[in-house]
Amino acid sequence: MSATDAGTVELGGARRVVRLGFGAMRITGRGIWGEPPDRERARSVLRRAVELGVELIDTADSYGPAVSEELIAEALHPYPAGLAIATKAGLTRPGPDRWEPDGRPEHLRAACEGSLRRLRVDRVDLLQLHRPDPDVPLAESIGALAELQREGKVAMLGVSNVTASELAEARSEAEIVSVQNRMSVLDRGAGEVLEACERDGLAFLAWAPLASGAAGGGDGALAGIAEARGVEPAQVALAWLLARSPVIVPIPGTGSVEHLEANVAAASLSLEETELEALSSARPSLRRRARELAWRLRHR
């Protein structure tokens, strides 16, 4: 069992990472707020991810806030060769499960400086704009990230939660190597952005690849394939994403070593063409759709 079974993807023409990453959002407290119930358990999950071959860990200054980045440094610094730490800037946290955009250049600079301190590095491997701010021109936000890159504080730049037109605008301002958008077998709304990534060789980091846990319960074709294969529905959902496109990097997150190991096992699950077709044509139930809508409203 190894994440390396998923193959690799190129980041910016200079770096390759395994196509199954780890999302470090859920190693914090409830509501992505404050300390986790057990810091050592959270650190154990991070260490185990690297042991299993994960080469990309995604975090953000707003996870905790700050807690996720601190735990990554505590567990893994000095970082092993080949491990890329991706973080994000551009969201603030008024409270648990609450998110507000702030794409002002001064905020993005302060956020980057804070990430550098917490991660104990001189340069961030990949810094992503967490979400466009409707009150700040996207060009200004991307320009601020590009300035940080010119100063040597950032190696590569990415964007997150963008439309295809926003991605095109961001790329006109700076070299963008990756997009992080929501995508799963139950949520395929980022198809146009994925097509742009495939066309232009950008990595697509799929966040919420298990549809915030909904895919783990199984639904229709997903449940049927999982039962026939003797695996978990969540593993089928991740295998579908890996097969969906060679540029997709699912970044499932968990606070449990057991769930982490199950997720990584999906890298070795090869789905048949008929199974892929069944999953691609399936639609989630109305109950699943309602659950997804509720989640989006809480995290918009």
Image: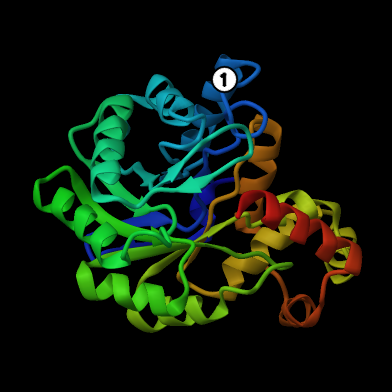
Label 1 packing within 10 angstroms: few (<14), some (14-19), many (20+): some
Identified at 21% across, 67% down, the residue is 174
| Residue 11: image location, x then y, percent | 31, 61
Quadrant of the snapshot with the C terminus: bottom right
Position of residue 192 relative to residue 209, above or below, is below
| Residue 194: image location, x then y, percent | 49, 76
Q: Amino acid at mark 1?
A: Glu
| Residue 229: image location, x then y, percent | 83, 61
Judged from the image, the secondary structure of the residue bearing numbered disc 1 is loop
Identified at 47% across, 74% down, the residue is 163
Is 298 or 205 nearer to us in this picture? 298
Residue 211: quadrant of the picture: bottom right
Instruction: Identify the residue at the far left of this view.
Output: 151
Q: Is residue 215 visible?
A: no
Query: How many badges with numbers are in the image?
Result: 1
Is 63 or 271 nearer to us in this picture? 63
Is 231 or 220 nearer to us in this picture? 220
The residue that disc 1 covers is: 35
| Residue 82: image location, x then y, percent | 31, 44
Residue 253: quadrant of the picture: top right
Instruction: Identify the residue at the far front of this view.
Output: 135
Quadrant of the snapshot with the N terminus: top right
Residue 108: quadrant of the picture: top left
Identified at 64% across, 31% down, the residue is 255
Q: Is residue 22 visible?
A: yes
Identified at 69% across, 55% down, the residue is 297
Position of residue 40 relative to residue 121, above or below, is above
* Apparent side of residue 6 relative to residue 126 in the rendered image (left or right): right
* Apparent side of residue 161 relative to residue 137 in the rendered image (left or right): right
Tell me how the rendering is colored: rainbow
